[in-house]
Amino acid sequence: MIAGQDLKGFYKGKKAAGKQLREEELRTAQISDICRQKLLNYADTFHELSESYDGDFTSKEGDRQKTLADKRVWENRQIIKDYLALMAKIMTETAREALCFYPMEERKKKVLVTALKQEGIRAENLSYLPQDEERNAVVMTLGTEKRETISAKEVADIVSVLLDRRLELSPASPCVVEKEPHTFILEEEAAFVALTGFSRVTKENETVSGDNFAAMETQQGRITVMISDGTGSGEQAGKDSERVLDLMEKMIEAGCTVDGAIGMVNTVFFSSEEDCGHPTLDVCDIDLYRGNCSLHKAGGAVTFLKREDQVEQLKSKTLPLGIFQQMELNPIERRLQDGDYLIMVSDGVIDALREHDYENTLENAISGIQEQNPSQIAEKLLRMAICAGGGHVLDDMTVGVIGIWENTTSEELSHS
């Protein structure tokens, strides 16, 4: 989405149908002025509240217990300050967000309208929606001529053929075209596709695993995979790791960056009672359009990148969540290629192989894997870890595998 103030720079030099786009050709859809002003007012309020919690901690001479209690209160105030500042930031960005459209070329518009009419579909307001410097989505208002419904996926396939582009229905669009008109967004297919597979086992004599995992499509063409390992094992560890993933999903869906979400989750655990656990968090964030991968670790175990028979170890020295008020994260960036695999593991897998030079043992095992299905790879590595422990499971163990391949159906974006 392009902010209004960035519009001029974004379209500078861009051509459509061989002509410079004129600014008056653009149509902008954004939230109403009343709603935007309310959000900005709320943002100002949250920002002022955040500033009211500002201030350095000053230690006074006297009772040590009182000093520690005062410091704890100050630390909690800083957590509230950070949370309020983040909410103010999200509200401000939402208020200023705008969808900037520009019209489709007349020739293409006529072809689409005519073809869809033959299928019993009315097509109106055909336009493009810029998503970044290289990709534009197709936006149109569709309704059926008769009462029956038509699959929106079928419409996407028709438009793909007519425009000679691989387009797919956006997650926010309706699944069917009905008589009542609705707006549909058809987005460019990503250059890569990803498949995930997980395998885990619970510690002996426990009924609940302290490990939890999640894979979410945070937006079109972006997948985020997470593994959290609760302190120890059992029900409380499972609740802690589940809470971590639940908070991460909600923060990311609200518009936070991965690092911002981890920072907020860290403050939640830091402000909890002293006997609260310190779960780890391992996040793999992949842009499927460009093949960029970013690993964010808060005490997470080593991750392995497999490229053919070569394996690279990706690790960080960051501590688990909730130990310090502030976390300094250093994401590990990699550019992925067709056929690459990312293997994420929890500490239980590492512990099972610790007496066997676990890093090299895992690296050699991963290098020799011939399976291509991520689930099969995860199961094979988990079985190896269990065998290394003599058949005993002394801690919760989780293996997550992400396979990435070039999307052979996707084509280069072209607006010629």
Image (cartoon, helix red, strand yellow):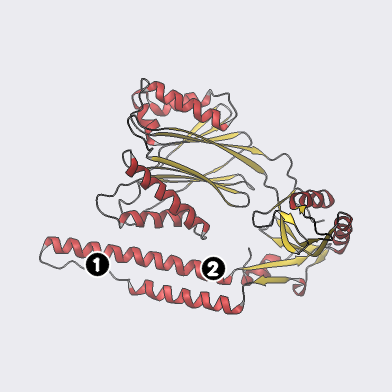
372 and 314: which is toward the camera: 372
What is the x, y in percent for residue 131?
66, 59
Q: Where residue 387 sits in the image (x, y, percent)? A: 40, 21
Number of the label disc, if any, that sits on residue 57:
1
- Identity of the amino acid at label 2? Glu
- Say which of marks 2 and 1 sits in front: 2
Q: How many marks?
A: 2
Identify the disc placed on residue 408: none
Res 396 visible: yes
Q: Quadrant of the C terminus?
A: bottom right
Q: Residue at x 33, y 24 (%)?
A: 355
| Residue 230 appears in the rendering | no
**Callout 1, which amino acid?**
Phe
Kindly give the residue lying farthest to the front in the view shown: 147
Q: Is residue 155 left or right of residue 172?
A: right
Vertical arrangement, residue 39 with respect to residue 397, above or below:
below
Residue 323 position within the rendered picture, expressed as x and y whole percent measured from the top left: 30, 50
Relative side of 184 to 114, left or right: left
Where residue 306 sits, quadrant-wise, is: top right
Q: Can you identify the residue that label 2 sits on?
A: 93
Give the mark nearest the N terminus, 2 or 1. Answer: 1
Place of residue 128 in the rendered image (x, y in percent of width and height, measured from the top left): 75, 62
